[in-house]
Amino acid sequence: MLGSDPGRVPSSVTLDNWQESPHLHWSFQHIADLFPTQTISRGLGPVADLPWASSTVGDVVVTDPPEGHHWHWHWPRHGHEQRTVADVMASTATDGWAVWHRGSLLAEDYLAGMEPWSAHILMSVSKSLVGSVAGSLAASGVLDLDAPLTRYVPALGAGGYAGATVRHLLDMRSGIKFSEVYLDEDAEVRIIEEAIGWAPRTHADVPTTMYDYLLTLEAKGPHGGPFDYRSCETDVLGWVLEGASGIRMSDLMSELLWGRIGAEWDANIGVDSAGAGMFDGGISTALRDLVRYGALMVQEGAALTGVQVLPAAWVADCFAGGPDSREAFAASESAALMPGGMYRNQFWAPSPDPDVLVALGIHGQMVYLNRRTQVVAAKFSSWPTPQDAGQLFSTLHAFDALSDALTY
């Protein structure tokens, strides 16, 4: 039985196939019907206004990137055919997309059965939300980013994370052994789904809770080395944030983030049998609220309601990176996809542009942030495969194009 109310789950959707086409459009919008979740409350505050402004951003032409552009290798060439932003959205398995610019909503479109209030899974965009909670706790003095993880979760001293710091987790620079190859059923990124109950158990020795599984991970090298994208880093980070605060993530995120951005609807997070959250990719939100979250990052941490939610210094650090963030990224396998980019505080900087960050999740979830042009673009998708460089970079280039068109 998948969910607490199996009558709401189509008989064709099973534990084996909910992450496969053609079920993705439905399952990505119904995580709470499939699995146990905890509510991330929007609180009792006012809803942040998203006034509509007449716009033709969907008609913005997206030209082929010039040779030498930082992601021209990944752009599917179309000869002399002109494509628009709307064309890119229509051809990339979009469930919903929206664009916000300087206080106004310029585009909002729902497909595949989505509605404005639908809660769609963020996948690894969840990581950026968890990272934002870390920034808030650090500013209040509850969390020391340079402290060893064992200060907050002593049990981590017995595993591969012994000696790692909070900063190592935030920037994914621990030395832990963890494969992120999504199409390999023996990769740790897939095995962790067995531990939380999101996949059939095909490995008999896998623990039955998230935290117990994290304790089995081993180190393959020293902590603090090159960037290496590993979802387990965010799961350990969430555990550490709970240890530092003494509060479950669903309540902590509501208190420090979701209840302060003027969200319109509650969010939710998938949890395991012990109530631990799927921090690396288990949060679901409505599209408009994801835009409201993104606005924090282009407004120096201030919500659309005027409340200072994140410290301005934390947001600036996300864009600037650390002294060696780009060098650590250049030494990673990801450097070939995003030359000159970096990873900082659970956000991607996809290029050398110091004003652009993105939050990314498999199957095409993303938030594009341009603080120079004050543009936030959010997209929910159901790509048939977890990763698709053509669809990813087509979308990022389209968002770059509309951001350039809105510059003034």
Image: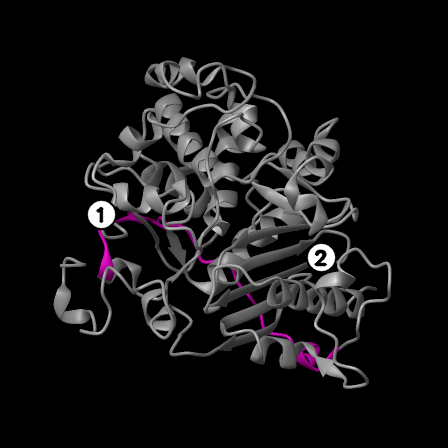
Task: Give the residue at x 69% y 76%.
Answer: 57
Instruction: Identify the residue under disc 1.
Output: 201
Q: Residue 80 falls in which quadrant of the image? A: bottom right
Residue 333 position (above or below residue 50) = above
Quadrant in which the C terminus appears: bottom right
Side (left or right) of 104 relative to 259: right
Q: Main secondary structure of the magenta part?
A: loop
Q: Which range of residues does the magenta coloring cover? A: 34-61
Side (left or right) of 58 relative to 178: right
Residue 388 image position (x, y, % from top left): 57, 63
Residue 358 image position (x, y, % from top left): 62, 52
Residue type beneath disc 1: Arg
74, 202: nearer the viewer: 202
Instruction: Identify the residue under disc 2.
Output: 374
Side (left or right) of 22 relative to 75: left
Is residue 240 on the magenta stretch?
no
Q: Is residue 340 visible?
A: yes
Q: How many residues crowd mark 2 within 10 Å: few (<14), some (14–19), many (20+)?
A: some
Q: Earlier in the sequence, mark 1 or mark 2?
A: 1
Element type where label 1 sits in the image: loop
